[in-house]
Image (spheres, helix red, strand yellow):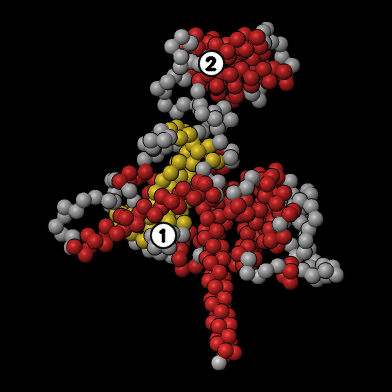
């Protein structure tokens, strides 16, 4: 249920944030630029009117998500820092200092699931609008990257041990009989698995791996016999069986029990040959570098097959189709999609192209590399590097919030820089007046 709005006519005898805070702070400016009513109108349909406990204000929840990805914080940290930072409180709609945390960290999880990917796309659209004319460039750059999931590096031994631990936990919770716990056996096998790269220990470690897999299979079959036919653990047991049955070169393997949709993606990097997550497509404007597209894909599709969806999202969010899209050679296959011309780096053997056109295309191909540091900053500064959100829905939510945060941060940096330049000019003028005054005194 939506909560009733506060009466701000008489807040108290103390001054409000409008009088206390610096109007030049980037967060103060950003709070006035965002159309918060758009989120109120779009997200209010997800709440009932008369039943249940009143929910937290929509602006508060949206602002916490934006702040989280701008400052690269966890749910717990952004809630704690909101209590300590008055600019965070003003940004979320408070008129005076509020003592106490705004909500529980878990409420951010519920809000993300409530509004879904469509709601995050609305926040992303607003971040493009904030950038004004910079986000309306007709020429764009598109590239893909891997959004890694928050899982450990997968090995068969790790997965089999986790299956054993989960089977024990289910048996204990349901109070089912277990013929053998294998506690001491697993302890000895764990010792045998160490230092497997040493020639003397390689055979012993392989035997230990095989024995652990056998124990995991026994516990799964025993649990299946003891549980009722229509058990709530039916899907879990099916997942355990698939993990135990998969082999080295199988397709669609399971790499994590709590994130079964994770894919192994090879990008040809020297320092990291394999990445475990999902593929995302990023679109930026060629001249200004505003992110106008951020799309998550399930699995590991060919880059060229992701391009139509990326161009459609760009057109949807900006209101106009891109005239030209510059991509790398991983997109080979199509040179035209609807109204958009696709430019792929290649040697100029075509005599029909003039020298001017060749020079222009070479500049665009060099400019294409500007998307690489953008992706790097998305990963290191705005939480795209490791995705902590659960499931396929979490993949789409994370990439949209990261892209929106980077667009907001871009404008905050511009406002910060403009005030710094103005301050430098004022100092320069003051210094000239001071020197002139000294000169007049001497004369």
Horizontal side, residue 434 vs residue 138: left or right: right
The structure residue drawn at horizontal position 53% and vertical position 67%, both measured from the top left corner, is 417
Furthest-bottom residue in view? 443
Tell me the residue that label 1 is attached to. 285
Furthest-right residue in view? 13
Q: Nearer the viewer, residue 48 or 142?
A: 142
- Around disc 2, counting alpha carbons within 10 Å, would you say few (fewer than 14), some (14 to 19), or many (20 or more)? some
The structure residue drawn at horizontal position 43% and vertical position 11%, both measured from the top left corner, is 199
Point out the tag, 1 or 2, that comes first from the N-terminus.
2
Horizontal side, residue 399 vs residue 177: left or right: left
| Quarter of the image where the C terminus is located | bottom right
Horizontal side, residue 75 vs residue 238: left or right: right
Query: Residue 45: x and y, percent?
Result: 66, 55
Q: Nearer the viewer, residue 368 or 397?
A: 368
The structure residue drawn at horizontal position 62% and vertical position 69%, both measured from the top left corner, is 24
**Is residue 86 placed above or below 184 in the rendered structure?**
below
The quadrant holding residue 240 is top right
Query: Residue 167: x and y, percent?
Result: 64, 18
Rounded to the nearest whole Å, what is the CA distance between mark 1 and mark 2? 51 Å
Q: Secondary structure at mark 1?
A: strand
The quadrant holding residue 234 is top right
**Is residue 245 placed above or below 52 in the rendered structure?**
above
Marker count (numbered): 2
Tell me the residue that label 2 is attached to. 194
Q: Secondary structure at mark 2?
A: loop
**Is residue 405 placed above or below 175 in the rendered structure?**
below
Is residue 296 visible from the viewing direction of this image?
Answer: yes
Q: Nearer the viewer, residue 50 or 280?
A: 280
Furthest-left residue in view? 351
């Amino acid at each position: 249920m939506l909560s009733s709005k506060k009466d701000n006519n008489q807040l108290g005898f103390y001054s409000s944030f409008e009088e206390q805070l610096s109007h030049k702070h980037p967060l103060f400016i950003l709070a006035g630029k965002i159309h918060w009513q758009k989120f109120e109108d779009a997200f209010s349909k997800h709440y009932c009117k008369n039943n249940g406990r009143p929910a937290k204000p929509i602006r508060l929840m949206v602002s916490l998500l934006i702040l989280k990805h701008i400052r690269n914080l966890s749910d717990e940290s952004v809630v704690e820092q909101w209590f300590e930072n008055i600019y965070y409180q003003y940004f979320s709609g408070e008129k005076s200092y509020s003592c106490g945390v705004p909500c529980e960290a878990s409420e951010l999880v519920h809000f993300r699931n409530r509004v879904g990917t469509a709601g995050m796309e609305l926040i992303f659209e607003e971040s493009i609008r904030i950038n004004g004319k910079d986000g309306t460039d007709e020429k764009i750059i598109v590239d893909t990257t891997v959004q890694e999931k928050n899982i450990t590096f997968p090995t068969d031994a790790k997965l089999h041990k986790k299956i054993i631990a989960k089977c024990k936990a289910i048996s204990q919770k349901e109070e089912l009989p277990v013929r053998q716990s294998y506690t001491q056996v697993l302890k000895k096998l764990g010792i045998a698995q160490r230092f497997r790269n040493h020639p003397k220990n390689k055979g012993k470690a392989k035997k230990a791996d095989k024995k652990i897999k056998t124990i995991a299979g026994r516990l799964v079959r025993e649990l299946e016999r003891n549980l009722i036919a229509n058990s709530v653990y039916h899907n879990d047991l099916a997942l355990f069986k698939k993990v135990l049955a998969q082999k080295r070169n199988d397709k669609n393997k399971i790499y994590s029990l709590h994130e079964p949709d994770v894919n192994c993606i090879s990008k040809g990097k020297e320092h990291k040959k394999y990445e475990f997550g999902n593929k995302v497509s990023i679109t930026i404007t060629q001249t200004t570098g505003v992110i106008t597209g951020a799309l998550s894909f399930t699995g590991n599709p060919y880059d060229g097959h992701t391009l139509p969806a990326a161009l459609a999202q760009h057109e949807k969010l900006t209101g106009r189709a891109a005239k030209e899209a510059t991509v790398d050679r991983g997109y080979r296959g199509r040179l035209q999609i609807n109204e958009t011309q696709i430019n792929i780096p290649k040697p100029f053997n075509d005599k029909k192209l003039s020298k001017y056109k060749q020079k222009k295309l070479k500049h665009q191909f060099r400019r294409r590399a500007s998307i690489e540091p953008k992706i790097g900053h998305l990963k290191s500064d705005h939480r795209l590097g490791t995705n902590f959100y659960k499931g396929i829905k979490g993949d789409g939510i994370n990439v949209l919030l990261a892209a929106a945060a980077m667009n907001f941060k871009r404008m905050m940096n511009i406002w910060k820089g403009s005030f710094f330049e103005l301050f430098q000019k004022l100092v320069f003028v003051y210094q000239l007046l001071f020197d002139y005054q000294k000169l007049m005194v001497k004369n």
